[in-house]
Amino acid sequence: MIEAEIAFLAPCDRRPIFHDKPSDEDFLPLIQHSVPIRAVHDERTAFTLDRHGVEIVHRADLPAYQSAGDGRTAYLRALEDVVTRTTGATEAMALGNGVVRRSERSTRHRRDGTTVLGRFAHCDFSPAAAGSRFWVEHLLPAEEARQRLTRRYAIYNVWRCLTDPPQDTPLAFCEPASMAPADVVGCDQMISTDDGSTICFELSLYHYSPAQRWFYFPDLRRGDLLIFTGCDSDRARPQGIAHAAFTDPSCPDDVPARESIDERVIAFFD
């Protein structure tokens, strides 16, 4: 068990909102808490999406990540295959909005299109229509989306380290059973698109509670894929997995700065 700082949504009387680029309209009041985080070692293979909302899949044959062109297409197709095999879905489709992140220790931090670490407790999706079915309707033609939405679908994050272990800034996860409904708050996220328009969707933020139980997987390999559930139309399944990057105080100071790629994949079930 270690202790580390994670930011949480502070008490507030307004709906949070933030943009992909700094804006005067941003309202994201955060407060830091020192949180006990359990390191999961040998027992990590027991973690499954159905029971915990988080699962590690090792794929040593995964194509190298590339940010554009045929290499990126091949990478996304490989992730879709991993998700269908892992979940039993009929089909999977990558959103294609993945982000590369680098630890603040990196000399390339925030360069070449990379973004800052998500050091606050959040989930990229929400159970509300604006944070779940929105993405199905955004990705697919209207009639196909309508048909897909009559059956089960789920959206997963697929997170992968692009640097060797150990990680100076791993991801912490909260056990979904320890997160109370009152801890969860919907937040508007505004993203600028290449054509100059803006996409607005809902993600989830979290207030701190001492009842929450946090854990992480140290020493992830390049071939390890962390798959975790953002939302699932089957509400009986774990979902809305809160996560946050944190500085691991047990990690040596001279390790390479963590670099990672986070993609999102929708799985459709018959």
Image (spheres, rainbow, N blue to C red):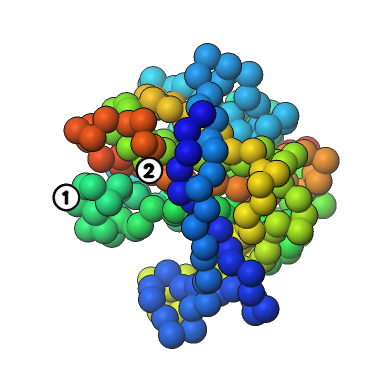
Q: Can residue 74 be seen? A: no
For this rendering, which residue is in front, 53 or 212? Answer: 212
Q: Is residue 199 above or below residue 68?
A: below
Q: How crowded is mark 2: few (under 14 residues within 10 Å), some or many (20 or more)?
A: some
Q: Residue 203: give x, y in percent of width and height.
A: 61, 61
Numbered label attached to residue 116: none
For the C terminus, the quadrant is top right
Q: Residue 62: give x, y in percent of width and height.
A: 39, 27
Q: Can residue 37 be seen? A: yes
Identify the residue shown where x is 34% and y is 50%. 101
For this rendering, which residue is in front, 151 or 42? Answer: 42
Name the element at disc 2: loop
For this rendering, which residue is in front, 146 or 21? Answer: 21
Q: Residue 243: give x, y in percent of width and height.
A: 55, 46
Q: How many discs mark residues in the rendered view?
A: 2
Q: Residue 111: give x, y in percent of width and height.
A: 22, 58
The residue tagged 2 is: 247
Marks 2 and 1, the one that precedes in the sequence:
1
Q: How crowded is mark 1: few (under 14 residues within 10 Å), some or many (20 or more)?
A: few
The residue tagged 1 is: 107
Nearer mark to the viewer, of 2 and 1:
2
- Tell me which amino acid carries mark 2: Thr
Identify the residue shown where x is 57% and y is 55%. 122
For this rendering, which residue is in front, 75 or 14? Answer: 14
The CA distance from mark 2 to mark 1 is 17 Å
Identify the residue shown where x is 47% and y is 33%. 2
Name the element at disc 1: loop
Toward the bottom, the furthest residue is 24
- Tell me which amino acid carries mark 1: Thr
Identify the residue shown where x is 16% and y is 50%. 107
Q: In this view, does 14 lie above or below 113?
A: below
